[in-house]
Amino acid sequence: MKIQELSTKVSPGGLFRTGQILSGQRSPANVRRQLDRWVKSGRVLRLRRGVYILTEPYSNAAAHPFAAANALKKASYVSLQTALSHYGMIPEYVPVTTSVTTGRPEELTTPIGRFQFQHVNPRLFFGFAEVEVSRDQRALLASPQKALIDLLYLTPHSDQVEYLRELRMSRPEYFDLDNLHGGAERSGSAKVERAVRRLLALWEEEP
């Protein structure tokens, strides 16, 4: 296989898993050796075991970090501070792409950025959808309501008013309060339900 052929097989942004290029090959061992050579030559970057990305000029576009996060960990979606920043709900720049997963928690430092995955119980794996995050690239992303619920659920003492004030969180016009209440109830966490009530009270205080 030539590098130009590989570029036609991978996802937009150049992301791919080993299985994508081994499928249908007569000699998987030869393909693996070729992949090792591409990594050594810098044409391909290894993000983690089994996950790679093409470098320019062989990739048609830079990989979006949300799409990369999905590729790095199956059964995950982008959420927490990253999603809230994406929706313009928190003012801080978030240097790490944060996701939740039903798998084990981990933090990865890769050639294209840092990625953090926090574990949640499978019953909390809801409230996300596949959306277009850049041209021809799609990723699983939490809704604004679910990103907030995930943050409150996973953060210790998130129901404290001091913590909620420090978030300096704004509420977009499209923010669905019914969806937020429903998600908080579905979380099964008294702490999350308290945090939601207190956050709404703070929003009511805003001019």
Image (cartoon, rainbow, N blue to C red):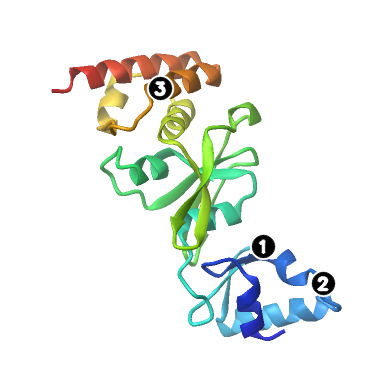
The picture places residue 16, in percent across and down from the top left corner, at: 63, 66
Q: On residue 24, which mark appears?
A: 2
Could you tell me residue 81's position as x and y percent?
39, 41
Residue mark closest to the camera, 1 vs 2 = 2
Secondary structure state at the residue bearing disc 3? loop
Q: Amino acid at mark 1?
A: Arg
Q: CA distance from mark 3 to mark 2?
A: 51 Å
Residue extending farthest to the right is 26
User: Given the image, on which type of amino acid does mark 2 rest?
Assistant: Gly
Q: Quadrant of the rendered structure where residue 159 is?
A: top left
Give the numbered dot on residue 157. 3
Circle 1 residue: 49
Residue lying furthest left: 207
Left or right side of 118 for 25 = right
Identify which residue is drawn at 74% across, 64% down. Answer: 19
Going from the N terminus, do you reach mark 3 or mark 1 first?
Answer: 1
Q: Residues within 10 Å of mark 2 (few under 14, many from 20)?
A: few
Say if residue 81 shows up in the picture. Answer: yes
Upstream in the sequence, badge 3 or badge 2? 2
